[in-house]
Amino acid sequence: MACMACLLLASAFVAAEAQQMQSNISRDSSLSPTTNSTWLSRSGLYAFGFYRQGNGYAVGIFLAGIPEKTVVWTANRDDPPVSNNATLLFTGDGLTLLTAEGQNYFVKSSGSASYASMLDSGNFVLYNSGREIVWQSFDHPTDTLLPGQRLLSGNELFSAKSEADHSTGIFRLKMQNDGNLVQYPVDTPDTSVYAFYSSLTVGQGENVTLNFGADGHLYLLNRNGTNIRNVTDGGLPTDEGKLYLMRIDVGGIFRLYSHDLKKNAIWSVEWESSKDKCIPKGLCGLNSYCVLIDLEPDCKCLPRFKSVNQGNQTSGCERNFVADACINRNENFTYTMEELESTWEDDSYMSLRLSDKDDCIQGCLEDCDCEAVFFDGTNCRKQRLPLRYGRRVNGTSLRALIKVGAPTKPDTDPRIVQPGSKKKGRTDILIIGLSFTALIHFVVDFRDCVVETQCLGIYKNERCELNESVAPRRYAYEELEKMTNNFKEELGRGASSTVYKGLILAHKWIWIGTAIGTAVLVMVLCISRRKLFSGETHPMVENELLEWMESDRSTGDVNGLQNDGKMGNNLTVFSYASVVAATTNFSEENKLGQGGFGPVYKGKLVTGREIAVKRLSRCSGQGTSEFKNELILISELQHTNLVQLFGFCIHGEERMLIYAYMPNKSLDYFLFDSTRAMLLDWTKRFNIIEGIAQGLLYLHKYSRMRVIHRDLKASNILLDEYMKPKISDFGLARIFAHNELEASTNRIVGTYGYMSPEYAMEGIFSIKSDVYSFGVLMLEIISGRRNSSFYNADRVLNIVGYAWELWKEGRGLELMDPTLKDSCTEDQLLRCFQVGLLCVEENAADRPSMSDVVSMLTTETISLPLPTRPAFITIRNVIVSDISISRRELQIISVNGLSNTTVAGR
């Protein structure tokens, strides 16, 4: 096969030599669209020159010897068409296009060109005076290969935009340097997740090329001339009446075509990379999916979406409904989930192990970040828009569930009773003047109403003085119709009411009405107060709390976060009485621990749900701002590796946060205890490492706000009943804009030993500060020792310095917790060790992002860079002088038992 390939290549060059002698194009020759528009090959089969495109002309190579003028190559394909006064000139430098706007080199030869030839192979060639090729079109393919042509290693074919527009389209075929022939959408990385065709020849040779034989044989040769893969079998007729070409079509399918000149036939497909025309990823654009109808692709929008451009299916689709009603908690707008039997690119920001589809649906409906979910029976993967690479797949277990919204219909909303409706229930109809205070209730008989009101204006000839009250009485429904002129003039709608303008025809019993109105008002106030102290949430109370939350927003801890005054994710406002009851009056036996914020208690609600109550210590100088910060932040965040916040309680000076209870306490409880550490085998520790990494990745990249935690440590990693890690304690966290790289502060807060050097020394922090803390935490998880436990009289290195010494000396396994001896996978442990050292690099820019960290931890085939010397932190018992921290600020900083600390880099 290798010899045959050599003969084919040799024959191609011999043919080039023979044909150029008979079809030479001399230097200074020219073409124009209207006169002498092409240079033909010897047989007249191929032509080089101008052809019609759009409202002008393009320059390229096409088959002139058949009725269907098939374009096989286009010069500068993404340039706009030129007018009919353009001129193409052949000079010693190559081919120059002259237009009214100026000149443009279409073809730049590598040496001085003396003459050119349009060959019968379809190759346009420039030669120097020594008959050597200085440029040829076969080396610069666009979307087509011809027999005798090769696609070299590292080169690509790009589909055309349409059959009539030969500019670059949306698909590409690449001969990769790793030996694999792969198809991708344009503008995507060369990674398998985006591929939709592959020759599966990765690693089978260097400098692999795709070759096209005269018999329709497409095959891959490595640098030694060895055939490593037949893409097509070949063996097709090779007589003069047969033409072949290979093309990546507009729709993304890679095909081999034949044409019979003797029969004057059309192009026939001899082979194609896929018979499913929906396979190419991105065919239908964003938020749309491909459906086969009679074997032809058709693009459909997601439910309640509309096409961006009806004439262009690749333009995708956009919402046909309000997008932010969930975030704004618009009660007159409801969301539902619509199911599609289809597959999509999985770019989930959260994956939950759920076997019940209804639970998956409910989880998305309750999460404003969630705009779709993919459910396969065991996993529920939450997605944000836009969705891409969608296609319908019959019989798949995967279901795409799309969140769609619509305004609540008044006639179906149980909270609103319409005028004339015979539906039983309760509503509030207000009969008012220019301004009003009124209260109306339907009673048991839905056609009778009781009205209490004050008249504060003048209507027609009926007059009442200001503050004149109307006695409460029972009105028949027909009377209300007359009073409101059949409910003609609507003044407005509330969440549970409709307000109409009306006229009270008679009024008396003024003092009785006033007395009853006052009594009702007192009764309402008493009931509201009773509800507040009985544990029920009241909207008025919540509004007051939210106003408190919104006050003093200049604090640096909330970082200027804009908020609409409504807590996200359905947080509950707990009454003080309910929290006292849940924690048995904050009893010592329910106390879980003590942090810088204050004590934490276990509690149990009347519903049976277990909670953890984080109570602000009155002695904490920073507790109030931390409370605000944590409440504002965590109410906007949802991830399986973040602790779940149920709500909060404010009572007098009391400030409390109510969390999900974590039965396995925190990571440090197990990790740093010699007995309990044995319960953390290597598999559990690796899963904890990976879970923390996923949580940080969400905070840094996938959450609505980019969040820097600033206090990541073992005691802030909680463990649920399955030992799954949950990042907690967001009191010191900061919010970054997604385009913000770093910030600085004079208030250094956090925990020494976990602080990055640039933060500890200069107050500069970024997402790479969290990466540093994560690296320290990884080394602690591997060693089972606190980062401060490596200090002694002879050595002042922390865990980072100690780990670096072991790494340099090739003794990485000595860092391992001895309890892991029987359970660890050495290669995986050493990989984590290396990733940990990469995370604690001295220069923040050299540390990997959390996205890179997750890839390095979960993909064993990724080669890891070698770590460089990290920043060692030494701790000396001296007075603080190098860092600007006040005494008051110093009190809230955990230093693992070491006080009066100076941090210095080495």
Image (cartoon, helix red, strand yellow):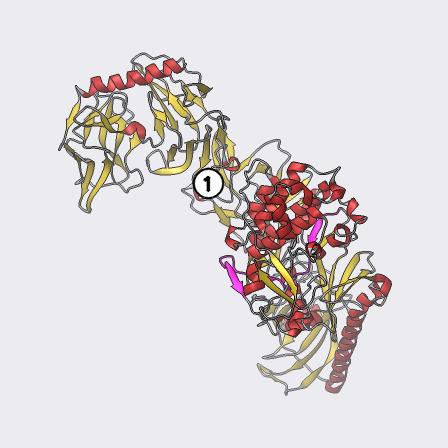
Most foreground residue, 817 or 751: 817
Let me know if residue 593 is in the magenta part.
no
Q: Which residues are magenta?
A: 723-744
Q: Is 727 within the magenta?
A: yes
Mark 1: give few (<14), some (14-19) or many (20+) Cα within 10 Å. Answer: few
Q: Which residue is mark 1?
A: 188
Query: For the point 42% across and 26% down, which residue is it?
Result: 208
Q: In the figure, is residue 75 to the left or right of 430?
A: left
Location of residue 603 (image quadrant) = bottom right
* Residue 164 pos. (x, y %): 32, 35
Quarter of the C terminus within the rendering: bottom right
| Image location (x, y in percent) of residue 539 | 70, 69
Query: Dot 1 lies on which element?
Result: loop
Left or right of 507? Residue 228 is left
Question: For this rendering, which residue is in front, 728 or 56?
Answer: 728
Q: Amino acid at mark 1?
A: Thr
